[in-house]
Image: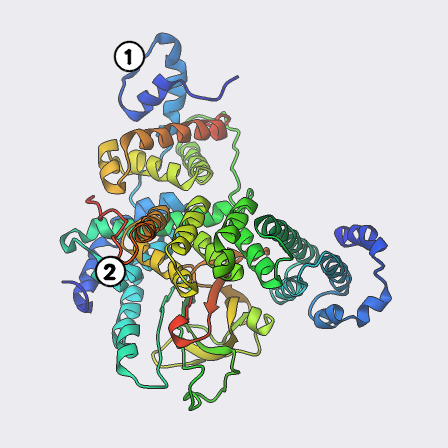
């Protein structure tokens, strides 16, 4: 038995035809198909008011922190570029994810103003996570063999913000944040690929040279 | 308003918080996911306020950002392969009571998740949001024939998945 | 564990033995994944090496699975999937250009496949690259564009047109950001990529013209 609806029945579902406009032999099919539309849930949806507060908390963070291009034009070496800030607030429980990329001059002395020195073919990447309520946060990925103990984030600045700076080898990396040692979180606003374990990994690519730095 | 006026943006967020919540919920299958998508869309919209070409039409512009977010999420789930969204198969011969109605609604929502994102979008805009094909075409920048083609394929797929339920 | 046992039977001809515990792959995995997984992944790594495929991605995926608490069977399946993709990428690259494809290109091709591109797409991207750009970079960009939701055909066309217009590696690297900017403006991923491809094609057709490329995306629509 074919499962394709008759074209006239489809037009009936579209609202272009009335039941009376259909040949009698199609009435049963049309009524059966109409039950499909009868099951549509048209109830309005109200989102929690707390969503507004979370959005505005992130928006105010953006306003406080200057944009990438203003930094680019303002600072002499060593300079910083914030290429992307993608905070993500995941549900009412905890985590929002963001990757904030600060690229420091690779080939120019002096040593960048951070404690960790980068090898010649690596770039400093700053990871930022907005996770109010989290007790510990770390970032793990292909750059540290998914060892969540090597790159813990520390509370930074505004409440709920965690950050760390990691020297990443030039190349493409996959990563995710681990919150409270049990919950893997990534940035759904960033490109992601399936990890093969039912989750997703965020993707970041860093290239040699400040102008070519990218957080993909 | 636009760029830089955070407190006026708070007013926009308040005004449009629920405007497309139903659309996002039907597209993604749960209020939780819709909440995440709407939140993300608001933040993206603030980041890109300078690119809003028609400041008086924030609603339409915001809808497109949210829509893209929903489509991207559904494509990701689709790439995850079969089994990501289990089909709820119900066998019921009970009277058409409220419990049965609720289960039918859930079954349809589950079946909607089995459509392609583009098919689901047209179905939701027409049969949940009650837009005409002309309105949908204007909103998405698509042609009416292409929308009808997606819709009619959606009808067939939904009917196939739900033939034992509805 | 039946899967691991079956894998052991199938891989026995490869000569996996207790001595595997002393090999570099096994040393990397020791303590990070169950012993059965060490044996299975070592065998898969041997298979990869025999075929001229990079081994590191297999080890990385196993370590990732261990870190994420995945079951042994799932880890082995995930590693097998990576191996399959590496093999497919190698074949696609060999079809695109003569010679042995470099390991980074094979890895990048596998990444592109994991993002959703098909073998033919990998071949097309590599062929479009030619000697003027790194196939590895082009494939990483192509994979990232796919992860952003751009359909495969549009990904290939965008990369091809960008290179045809004389684009360098930095122009390729900029593509994901440019697509995301278009997405934020209301375009679909397909529209964004198609618009950028058209702009690149226009530049290629009229070299020497200055000015910003035309926007290819439609204006925002009214509700």
Residue found 43% across the figure and 89% down from its top: A109
Residue found 49% across the figure and 86% down from its top: A116
Chain letter of disc 2? C
Question: Is C143 placed above or below B153 here?
Answer: below
Q: Which colour assignment does the render follow?
A: rainbow
Helix, strand or loop under label 2: loop
Helix, strand or loop under label 1: helix
Q: In this view, does A62 lie to the left or right of C6?
A: left
Q: Is residue C143 visible?
A: yes
Residue C15: % across, % down: 85, 59
Residue C3: % across, % down: 75, 51
User: Quick one: label 2, few (<14), some, or many (20+) residues within 10 Å?
Assistant: few
What whole-number distance in Å separates the C-alpha atoms at marks 1 and 2? 63 Å
Question: Residue under circle 1?
Answer: A20
Which is more toward the observer, C124 or C108? Answer: C124
Q: Is residue A49 visible?
A: no
Q: Tell me, yes or no, whether dots 1 and 2 are on the same chain.
A: no
Q: Residue C210 carries which label?
A: 2
In which quadrant of the rendered image does the C terminus of chain A lie?
bottom left
Residue found 86% across the figure and 63% down from its top: C17
């Amino acid at each position: 038995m074919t499962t394709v609806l008759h074209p006239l029945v489809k037009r009936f579902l579209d609202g272009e035809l009335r039941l009376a406009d259909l040949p009698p032999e199609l009435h049963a099919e049309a009524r059966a198909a109409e039950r499909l539309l009868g099951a549509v849930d048209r109830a309005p949806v109200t989102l929690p008011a707390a969503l507004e507060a979370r959005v505005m908390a992130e928006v105010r963070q953006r306003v406080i922190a200057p944009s990438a291009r203003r930094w680019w034009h303002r600072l002499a070496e060593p300079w910083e570029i914030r290429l992307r800030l993608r905070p993500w607030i995941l549900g009412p429980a905890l985590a929002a994810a963001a990757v904030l990329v600060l690229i420091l001059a690779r080939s120019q002395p002096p040593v960048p103003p951070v404690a960790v020195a980068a090898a010649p073919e690596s770039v400093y990447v700053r990871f930022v996570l907005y996770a109010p309520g989290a007790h510990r946060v770390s970032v793990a990925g292909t750059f540290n063999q998914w060892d969540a103990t090597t790159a813990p984030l520390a509370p930074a600045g505004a409440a709920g913000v965690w950050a760390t700076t990691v020297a990443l080898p030039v190349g493409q990396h996959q990563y995710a944040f681990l919150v409270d040692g049990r919950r893997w979180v990534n940035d759904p606003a960033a490109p992601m690929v399936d990890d093969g374990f039912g989750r997703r990994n965020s993707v970041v690519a860093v290239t040699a040279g400040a102008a070519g730095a990218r957080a993909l | 308003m636009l760029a830089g006026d955070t407190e006026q943006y708070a007013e926009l967020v308040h005004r449009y918080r629920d405007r497309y919540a139903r659309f996002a919920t039907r597209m993604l299958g749960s209020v939780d996911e819709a909440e995440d998508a709407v939140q993300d869309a608001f933040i993206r919209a603030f980041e890109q306020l300078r690119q809003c070409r028609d400041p008086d039409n924030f609603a339409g512009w915001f809808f497109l950002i949210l829509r893209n977010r929903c489509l991207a999420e559904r494509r990701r789930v689709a790439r995850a392969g079969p089994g990501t969204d289990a089909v709820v198969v119900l066998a019921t011969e009970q009277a058409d009571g409220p419990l049965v109605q609720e289960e039918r609604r859930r079954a349809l929502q589950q079946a909607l998740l089995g459509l392609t994102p583009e098919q689901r979008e047209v179905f939701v805009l027409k049969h949940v949001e009650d837009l005409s094909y002309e309105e949908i075409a204007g909103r998405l920048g698509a042609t009416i024939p292409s929308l009808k083609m997606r819709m009619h394929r959606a009808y067939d797929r939904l009917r196939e998945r739900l033939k034992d339920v509805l | 564990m039946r899967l691991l046992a079956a894998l052991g039977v199938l891989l026995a001809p490869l000569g996996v033995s207790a001595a595997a515990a002393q090999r570099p792959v096994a040393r990397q995995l020791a303590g990070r994944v169950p012993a059965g997984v060490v044996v299975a992944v070592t065998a898969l790594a041997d298979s990869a090496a025999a075929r001229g495929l990079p081994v590191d991605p297999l080890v990385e995926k196993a370590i990732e699975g261990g870190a994420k608490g995945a079951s042994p069977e799932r880890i082995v399946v995930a590693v097998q999937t990576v191996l399959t993709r590496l093999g497919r990428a190698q074949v696609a690259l060999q079809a695109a250009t003569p010679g042995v494809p470099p390991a980074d290109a094979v890895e990048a091709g596998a990444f592109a496949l994991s993002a959703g591109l098909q073998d033919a797409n990998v071949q097309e991207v590599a062929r479009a690259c030619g000697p003027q750009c790194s196939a590895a970079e082009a494939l990483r960009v192509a994979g990232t564009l796919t992860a952003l939701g751009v359909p495969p055909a549009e990904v290939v066309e965008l990369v091809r047109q960008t290179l045809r217009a004389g684009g360098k590696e930095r122009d390729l690297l900029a593509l994901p950001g440019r697509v995301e900017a278009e997405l934020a403006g209301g375009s679909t991923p397909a529209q964004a990529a198609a618009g950028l491809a058209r702009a690149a094609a226009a530049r290629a057709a009229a070299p020497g013209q200055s000015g910003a490329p035309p926007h290819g995306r439609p204006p925002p629509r009214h509700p």
